[in-house]
Image: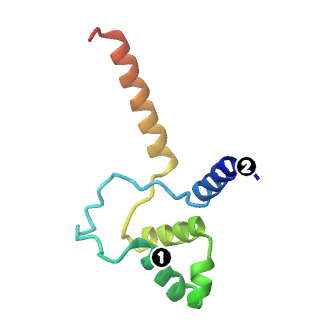
Amino acid sequence: MNAALEAVKFSTYRANGSLEFPLSDRVDPRREPGPSPGTPFLLQLQQFLMLRFQMKEHEAWDYKYGLAKMHWTAYWEQEGGLRVKNAQEIEFEQFIAEQEAKGRAQWPA
């Protein structure tokens, strides 16, 4: 067994299982800003799975992390608690970055 290769494979596996929706930077004027909860996110996620999907504690701990985050994000977007970036926002940000890069290339520093 090649330990270095196995470590890379595990790191890739963990990163792929932790994917999440990008959150939008746009402000929703209907939502009042408030402090972030103090509970660690992993515990919030576990409680969410137990309450929303009636999972037992061990089932929530064994649930796929990336999928749990996507369910949590979708739920809170539906409730108005946050906003997920949509494809149009992402394309617009890419367009702005490209235009800014072109502008920097045209002007000497």
Residue 70 image offset from top left, x and y in percent: 54, 66
Give the residue at x 57% y 82%: 60
Give the secondary structure at mark 2: loop
Please state which of residues 81 and 19 is positioned toward the viewer in this rendering: 19
Residue 59 image offset from top left, x and y in percent: 62, 85
Residue 82 image offset from top left, x and y in percent: 38, 65
Q: In which quarter of the image is residue 77?
A: bottom left
103 is higher (above) or lower (below) than 77: above
Camera-nearest label, 1 or 2: 2
Amino acid under label 2?
Asn
The mark found on residue 8 in the picture is none
45 is higher (above) or lower (below) than 7: below
Give the residue at x 42% y 56%: 23
Q: Residues within 10 Å of mark 2 (few under 14, many from 20)?
A: few
Q: In which quarter of the image is residue 104?
A: top left
Q: Residues within 10 Å of mark 1 (few under 14, many from 20)?
A: some
Please state which of residues 60 and 95 is positioned toward the viewer in this rendering: 60
- Residue matched to label 2: 2
Mark 2 or mark 1, which is nearer the start of the sequence? 2
Amino acid under label 1?
Leu
Which of the image's four quarters has the C terminus? Answer: top left
Give the residue at x 60% y 59%: 14
Marks 1 & 2, CB-CB < 8 Å contact: no
- Mark 1 and mark 2: Cα distance apart in space: 34 Å
Residue 27 image offset from top left, x and y in percent: 29, 56
5 is higher (above) or lower (below) than 44: above
The mark found on residue 45 in the picture is 1
72 is higher (above) or lower (below) than 7: below
